Amino acid sequence: MWPNQKISHFLINKNKSLLVIFILSLFLFIPMSYHNVYQINNNIVYAEETVIPILTYHNFTKDEGSSYSINIIEFEKQMNYLATHNYSVISLSELLKGLKNGQLPPKPVVITIDDGFKSTFTLAYPVLKKYNFPATLFIYTDFIERNSNSLTWGEIKEMTENNLEIGSHTLSHCNLLQYKENENYENYLARIKKEIFLSKEILEIKIGGKVKFFAYPYGVYSPTIINLVIQADYEGILNANIMNNTLNADPFSLNRQIIFGNNSFNSFIQILNQQPLHTSKIFPDDGIIESDQFIKIGAILEDNNYDVKTLSMKLGGAKVGFTFNPENNEISFTSSKPLIKKSYIINISALDKNSNYLRKKSWLINIK
């Protein structure tokens, strides 16, 4: 065999060996998606993922913070943390584009501000400008220019010309699932449709641009409400399901994290680092309206990165006693008392095995 032939023979055999090793590795270490999901020895393992927190604020104050009103010094401290820890604060439009093409900057974060309080312009807006951070304001139009605590259309217009987007929060900030007294289904549907469609039209006229995003008041919705919002030609819908988004997020089901004014700074950092708790099934399904007041609520967990001893389940913010079946990883709760007519955010969480950060799964159920 000539020297060149020997070299060629060696390279061919080497490449064959590498191919065999590669094929074997597929069976031992199988990627399940583009989010660093692997199957090892029949166990599904989720590596740390890119998460996209959508932070939600309401009111701002120079006084001590309360639940929906954050002290402006604390707000600036949070914005400074994002700026100095290499977070990429992006707009909702940039997020939507990134979800479509699968490309987002490192450590993406979105800022949203709800309702339309005057303090958004007088206190928060200067801080956002200082750091050159975009944000989206979700406005309910009946509140604008109502009193001295509400924004003016002029202030809103100025902010839209300086890196802030506007989204709809309906006309009146009503509960979109709640009937008025003696209201039949047809009248209810017409009223809700007006809240969704007309608010968009008013905002687009006032700001002279397209309104692409809608946020549910009180975070409540149903399949009917979702369909109405999509029919109104919104491109993204935001809930209040207190968990972070991932790169495979549905633009019509974007989760938000409410930043309360009386929360600690450490809790803010925990939110930024929170990972998803993956499930293969949830019950009941997200947003479904149930008539059974004793319905079984829970999920099948498929994430093996959580510490079972730290599992927690909440119903509408209140911890509940749950059962956990290690054979199929089912966590569930059935109330011993009838659940009253209400919407509940279900929250299942556990600490990650390899860090102090939380893994969380949240969704909404509605009881007739």
Image: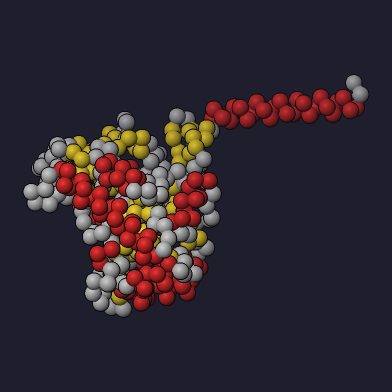
In the image, 154 versus 72, the foreground residue is 154
Q: Residue at x 37, y 60 (%)?
A: 204
Residue 268 visible in the snapshot? no
Which residue is outermost to the left?
Answer: 182
Q: Nearer the viewer, residue 164 or 281?
A: 164
Residue 156 figure quarter: bottom left
Give the farthest residue toward the bottom.
Answer: 62
The answer to which image quadrant residue 211 occupies is bottom left
Q: In this image, 322 relative to 341: left or right? A: right
Report the quarter where the C terminus lies: top left
Query: Quick check: 281 above or below 344?
Result: above
In the rendering, at what x and y percent does residue 226 appear? Answer: 30, 44
Tell me if I can see residue 134 in this picture.
yes
Seen at 64% across and 29% down, the residue is 21
Tell me residue 77's x, y (percent).
Answer: 41, 72
Instruction: Tell me the quarter of the image containing the N terminus.
Output: top right
